[in-house]
Image (cartoon, helix red, strand yellow):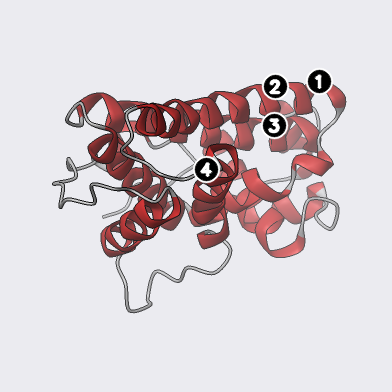
Amino acid sequence: MAKMRTGKDAILDAAVDRFERLGYHGTSMRDIAQGAGLTVASIYNHFPSKQLMLQDIMVRVLSDALALTRNAVLRAERHPVAQLSALVHTWLVFHSERRAEALIGASEIRSLDPAGRRLIVALRDEQEALFRSVVEWGVEEGVFATPYPEDAVRALIAMGTSVSSWYKPDGPLTPEQMGERYVRLGLGTVEATEPRPVEVATSPAPGDFESDL
């Protein structure tokens, strides 16, 4: 039996649902209160503003993605193909399983105030640096033949963020199958010269790093 979520958890659940469906600017505090089954006054006990609510959601989802992808790279065989495979697989599974939060994280940066934007950009930069380190290592080793490593990194990141905008849990592919499919696409993007089959380390269970949203 699913645990009933109350208080701050219920507020964030409702905010994710409304921000995804209505957009940040199209969502009112009253909309969130109705979704959480609370009064507007109760929400202000947890979040003094809708802006801080958005920042909380975005920090959590980006921090979780960063933790999972770092762990995947550390657990993979020390080889560029293996590490990029693990990285892309985890990135795609994450964006398939946590689709709504990931979509908000990717699309609502324009709605952040300057302080919130600096915080989120810093987290995004850390995530990009992880992709860049693996891709550049593969290029230096002659394993990835792409002459455009910076563009390849952007494309790999966009693979995950774009999936969050259309993936359906009841569709034909599971998150794991999505990860496997996009590993092949990712290796093609960097023009892997050693596209040998690699066994992608099983990602930690979603609950290991999943936020309380």
Label 1 sits on residue: 115
What residue type is disc 1 on?
Answer: Ala
> Dot 2 surroundings within 10 Å: few (below 14), some, or many (20 or more)?
some
Residue 41, position as x, y percentages in the image: 78, 37
Q: Disc 1, disc 2: CB below 8 Å?
A: yes
Viewer-nearest of discs 4 and 2: 4
Q: Secondary structure at mark 3?
A: helix
Proximity of marks 4 and 2: CB atoms separated by less than 8 Å: no
At label 4, which amino acid type do we have? Answer: Pro
Tell me, for residue 119, which label it has, or none.
2
Q: In terms of secondary structure, where does tag 1 sit? A: helix
Mark seen at residue 147: 4
Residue assigned mark 3: 55
Q: Label for residue 88?
A: none
Q: Residue at x 33, y 79 (%)?
A: 172
Residue 1 falls in which quadrant of the image? Answer: bottom left
| Residue 194, x across and y down, in percent | 23, 47
- Compared to residue 178, the image places residue 203 above or below, namely above
Say which amino acid is labelled 3. Answer: Gln
Q: CA distance from mark 4 to mark 2?
A: 32 Å
Q: Amino acid at mark 2?
A: Leu
Give me the residue at 20% from left, 28% from top.
75
Upstream in the sequence, badge 1 or badge 4? 1
